Amino acid sequence: MREQTAHSSVCFNFQIKDARRFRVKSRTIVRWCDLLEKEPVILLHVDGHDIHRQAYGFLSLHDWILDNPDWPTKAEQSPIIAFTLNRFTPVDESGSNFRTAMLNEADRVLGNRSSIWRTRQTQFIPLSEMDIFRQFGRLSRFEVPTAAIAEASQLQGVLVGEDMWGALRELWSLPDRLRSTPAVTSGIGGWLNVLSRTPGNHTAIRERQEFSRFVKAMRLYDEDKPYPMPGFRWEEVKCWRVFFAIFPESFRLLQRLIANQSFWNSDQYRTALMLISTLARGEDGTMAMRANDLLRKAGEVLTSSEVSTYAEYGPVRQYLFTRAEAEGGRQLRRCLDFLQRYKTQEQDWELRLHRQYYKNNDAITIRAMRSKLERPKPRDEHTGAITTAILERAERLVTKRK
């Protein structure tokens, strides 16, 4: 079925069943999911047990995969996937709720801003929406180092991908036997080597859990209710950074959080500032401008008073670092001055902040800082001097303890 919208047409795919159970072959689900980013798939159940009146229920497959982020595992482990009928929405008498749902799905695949689930392609994280579900356990590894992006730009005539996103995605999806070709040079080769490492099962479970929290946050926002946000911990932030990059309307979560801080704690506020930076450094010029404006709005409150406690230090420091990450230049010097000003505290607040972020382990902080300097991502390009200063402080502390 093809639905005509105001400016474009969308091809809808329907699966209709009238049995007491709604069961579909797993390989069919996989095939449908490959269509989902361009064509909606709708499951329609017909209850015809009353000969005088039929009742209809519908379920968007996109909604189902959001609720079941482990669907690729389910499809691998069982030849059949059974859908629970109580998850189907009854079609009302006028059919208006069904039409609204179909229009929402059309907005999603057309990339209209009215859809919270519209997606975008970013060369910084070359993943599609369906890739997220298939790559739990290694999501943060897909953030491309600057060196790999530079090398890939020289290969666009060799690779099939029409743009940088397509070229980079083609590179990571190459079979192992092709990854040793001369085209896969040091920057790209290092990135692919990191991607090829088998993730632990606990990491995959954690990333699925974080995705479910993200989905819940987006839906609660749409219902105008308070929603969960990640804490100031690396294992949470690394996932949400990917989600925010691929689902641009997640920016709404940050706007509401900055405007209504009382609903969230200080850790979540600091994390929001980090996520704003992800969008401020993106290729989308309009989004980058909106993100930078939001940062400045946050700064009007954060930088209006002196810092006298660690609780006050954290948000101000994160704001200044985020501005430096997004803009460099004067903002970099401003952040360095701030770090130097509070360096003489009896307890080093900066290292305390990194212990909170990196599992209370100075060794992990040191490894993370070295990685940023040796294999910087685009978001690290402006903050090398800050990273160097933090690394030196952490190394001195570790040496002093020995």
Image (cartoon, rainbow, N blue to C red):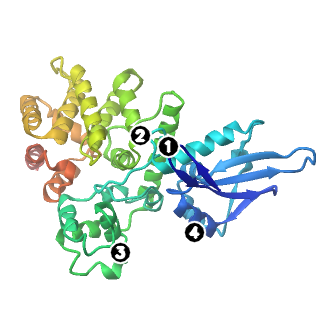
For label 2, the crowd category at 10 Å Cα-Cα, with few meaning under 14, some 14 to 19 and many 20 or more, is many
Q: Residue at x 62, y 39 (%)?
A: 100
Badge nearest the viewer, 2 or 4: 2
Q: Residue 162 at what x, y percent from top left?
A: 32, 66
| Badge 3 amino acid | Leu
Badge 4 crowding class, 10 Å Cα cut-off, few under 14, some 14 to 19, many 20 or more, is few
Residue 323 horizontal/vertical position (percent): 18, 35
Q: Earlier in the sequence, mark 4 or mark 3?
A: 4
Q: Secondary structure at mark 4?
A: helix
- The three-letter amino acid code for the residue at tag 4 is Glu
Disc 3 residue crowd, few under 14, some 14–19, many 20+, Cα 10 Å:
few
Q: Tell me which numbered mark, 2 or 1, is placed earlier along the sequence.
A: 1
Q: Please give the label number shown on residue 249.
A: 2
Label 2 vs label 3, nearer the camera: 2
- In the image, is 115 to the left or to the right of 49? left
Between discs 1 and 4, the one toward the N terminus: 4
Instruction: Read off the residue under disc 4.
Output: 76
Q: Which residue is more in the foreground, 350 or 299? A: 299
**Can the viewer see residue 65?**
no
